[in-house]
Image (cartoon, helix red, strand yellow):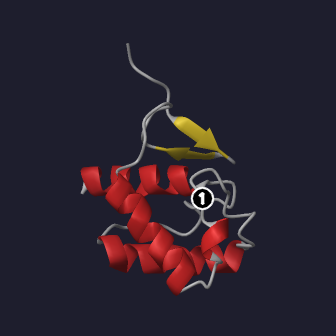
Amino acid sequence: MTQSPITTGGHTAPDGPGREAPAGVRRRIAAVLTGQFKVPAESVQPHTTLREMKFDSLVLIELGLVLDKEFSVAIDDGELSDAFTLEELAAFVAGKQADA
């Protein structure tokens, strides 16, 4: 049986529901969020949304560019949503890596 993709804020994370993103991807994204974007470490939790971390549309574009370089994936403007949780963002990036 095929699982449906995770849809968040009109954007789809490529891993299906119930699938966790690879821990290494999640840790690297957490390091980017705390290091480059100065998000307090206690705010960077698997189910915390980017909106809760105070990311607006301009910061999402910058985050996409940083993730492009960090993970060698192509993330187009508008693909990231402030409704993504850290877990969903990591699944999204991992899916982009798998497609590359």
Give the vertical position of 13 relative to 76 (above or below).
Answer: above
Residue 75 visible to the viewer: no
How crowded pointer 1 is (Cα within 10 Å; few <14, some 14-19, many 20+) is rated as some
At mark 1, the secondary structure is loop
Q: Position of residue 59 (x, y in %)?
A: 65, 79
Quarter location, residue 66: bottom left
Give the vertical position of 88 relative to 32 (above or below).
Answer: above
Q: Residue at x 65, y 69 (%)?
A: 42
Q: Position of residue 31 (x, y in %)?
A: 46, 75
Q: Residue furthest front?
A: 42
Q: Is residue 27 left or right of residue 59?
A: left
Work out whether residue 32 or residue 78 is closer to the camera in this orientation and state it.
32
Please tell me how many numbered marks the rendered image carries: 1
Q: Position of residue 93 (x, y in %)?
A: 40, 58
Q: Residue at x 66, y 56 (%)?
A: 48
Work out whether residue 46 or residue 1 is closer to the camera in this orientation and state it.
46
Three-letter code, disc 1? Gln
Q: Residue furthest top?
A: 1
- Looking at the rendered image, the quarter that the N terminus falls into is top left
Give the vertical position of 64 relative to 95 (above or below).
Answer: below
Q: Residue at x 49, y 69 (%)?
A: 30
- Looking at the rendered image, the quarter that the C terminus falls into is bottom left
Q: Which residue is mark 1?
A: 45
Q: Residue at x 37, y 54 (%)?
A: 23
Q: Position of residue 27 (x, y in %)?
A: 41, 65
Quarter location, residue 19: top left
